[in-house]
């Protein structure tokens, strides 16, 4: 970002929990559109701009104070649009947008998306299908019979994302073990450092069987446009719920896809979301479509690279990041449709926690017909945590083909060729070599 901020510059506030591979995609799109990104991040405000990007340092756990800090820095400077990456920055973005007079979601709606408990209450009150649910303290460990818990059920932290800490319990013993494990996670130094609210509480709800899908959408003045429906071909049945494969277009029957779209519209209306990107998760079974979560942000990580958009207004196809910039800044091309080819991404799962010692098979995976890219984001010699304690992936594997079935097959074949060596955290004589099966095998 240029250090000179003139009033003639088209400027967009980008709220991000950290500056990494996702923000770099926005940087590329911003350069193409001649747009200046003003970063708002939760880095330490005592650091003297170590990355040279002139980011505004805030604390996202205090969204109103963060918004005030942003408005103080930008006093007298014109800002045209606002975007947020990740769940934590979205609330601060909403408060800042309101203070700057920029069209965006209301802060109360975004705050409701941040709490799994509040979201369940909103969906229930709007008449949407929800499982039974209740909030319980993490300490002392609840006794299921006294808490009126039935099985199977799912234990969740109230505000963590990426299915971190989410566990299924099929009986009393599994519930007690899961509650103890969740308490340890929420009491860990890593989680406390995030200053997330309600770390002393968990939500317990009935397990919803069925297939899971993800919906990527874009709201304009309260009208939701569906950008893509992703199938998740691997069953997410527990005991943990690590994401793996996303493939679009969906292979569900058109009638079922219509029900998903209807449920997505009902869910965003119930939450009061009106403007900007939406990422939502749904369960589909014989009883209908169940909203799991709705987030006022785009799809996370590098998964957005599985989406390309084209229209007769554009000379070439564009990525989701450019589409969102065009939408936020009211530039032509924000109505582009997803390209006709099927596409997908594998969020490469972590087989077990430990130190990542070695990666091999990348060239073979990239040579797999249909595979378009492989990006390893985990760093060698770093500790990586598997689910439910973990919340990141080893990397991302992308594919394109004529059909969704071909995309899925390419991803599974490419994944089979990757090999990771992960050793326990404590020193041992021999590291564990794990030849990864295809996700879902």
Image (cartoon, grey):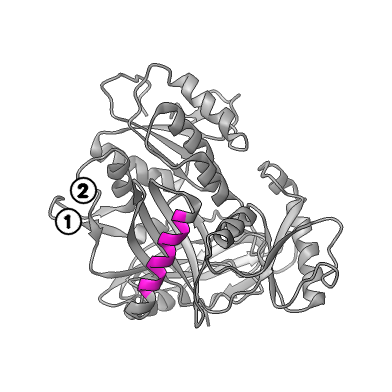
Q: Position of residue 199 (x, y in %)?
A: 73, 49
**Residue 84 quadrant:** top left
Q: Which residues are magenta?
A: 257-269
Which residue shows up at 35% across the image and 25% down it? 2
The image shows residue 13 at horizontal and vertical percentages of 40, 33
**Residue 265 at least partly seen:** yes
Q: Is residue 42 left or right of residue 7?
A: right
Which residue is disc 2 drawn over?
333
Near mark 1 (Cα within 10 A), the count class, few <14, some 14-19 or many ≥20, is some
| Residues packed near mark 2 inside 10 Å, few (<14), some (14 to 19) or many (20 plus) | some
The reply to whether dot 1 and dot 2 touch (C-beta < 8 Å) is: yes
**Where is mark 1, residue-wise?**
311
Q: Residue at x 51, y 46 (%)?
A: 109
Dominant secondary structure of the magenta stretch? helix
Q: Nearer the viewer, residue 162 or 347?
A: 162
- Residue at image coords 81%, 76%: 172
Quadrant containing the N terminus is top left
Which disc is residue 111 wearing?
Answer: none
**Would residue 267 be counted in the magenta stretch?**
yes
Q: Name which residue lies at 23% across and 52% down.
A: 335
| Up-down relation of residue 283 to residue 180 (above or below) | below
């Amino acid at each position: 970002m240029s250090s000179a901020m003139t009033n003639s510059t088209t400027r967009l506030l980008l709220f991000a929990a950290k500056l990494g591979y996702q923000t770099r995609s926005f940087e590329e799109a911003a350069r193409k559109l001649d747009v200046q990104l003003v970063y708002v991040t939760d880095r330490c405000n005592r650091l003297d701009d170590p990355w040279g990007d002139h980011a505004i340092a805030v604390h996202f756990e205090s969204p109103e104070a963060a918004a005030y800090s942003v408005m103080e820095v930008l006093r007298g400077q014109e800002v045209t649009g606002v975007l947020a990456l990740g769940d934590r920055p979205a609330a601060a973005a909403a408060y800042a947008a309101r203070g700057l007079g920029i069209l965006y979601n209301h802060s109360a709606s975004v705050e409701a998306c941040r709490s799994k408990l509040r979201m369940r209450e909103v969906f229930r009150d709007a008449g949407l299908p929800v499982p039974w649910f209740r909030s319980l303290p993490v300490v002392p460990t609840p006794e299921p019979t006294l808490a009126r818990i039935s099985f199977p059920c799912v234990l969740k932290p109230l505000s963590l994302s990426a299915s971190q800490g989410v566990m299924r319990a099929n009986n009393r013993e599994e519930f007690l073990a899961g509650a103890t494990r969740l308490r340890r996670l929420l009491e860990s130094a890593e989680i406390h450092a995030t200053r997330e609210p309600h770390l002393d509480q968990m939500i317990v709800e009935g397990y919803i069987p069925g297939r899971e899908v993800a919906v990527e959408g874009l709201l304009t003045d309260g009208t939701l446009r569906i950008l893509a429906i992703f199938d998740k071909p691997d069953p997410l049945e527990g005991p943990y719920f690590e994401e793996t494969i996303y493939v679009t277009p969906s292979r569900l029957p058109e009638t079922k896809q219509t029900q998903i779209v209807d449920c997505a519209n009902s869910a965003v209306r119930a939450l009061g979301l009106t403007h900007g990107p939406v990422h939502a998760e749904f369960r589909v079974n014989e009883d209908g479509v169940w909203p799991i979560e709705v987030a006022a942000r785009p799809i996370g990580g590098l998964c957005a690279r599985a989406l390309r958009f084209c229209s007769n207004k554009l000379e070439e196809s564009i990525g989701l990041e450019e589409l969102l910039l065009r939408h936020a800044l009211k530039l032509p091309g924000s109505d582009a449709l997803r390209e006709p080819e099927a596409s997908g991404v594998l969020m490469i799962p972590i087989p077990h926690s430990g130190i990542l010692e070695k990666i091999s098979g990348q060239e073979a995976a990239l040579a797999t017909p249909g595979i378009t890219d492989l990006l390893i984001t985990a760093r060698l010699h770093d500790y990586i945590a598997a689910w439910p304690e973990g919340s990141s992936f080893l990397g991302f594997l992308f594919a394109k083909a004529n059909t969704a079935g071909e995309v899925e097959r390419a991803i599974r074949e490419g994944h089979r060729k990757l090999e990771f060596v992960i050793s326990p955290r404590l020193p041992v004589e021999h590291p564990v070599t794990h030849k990864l099966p295809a996700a879902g095998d």
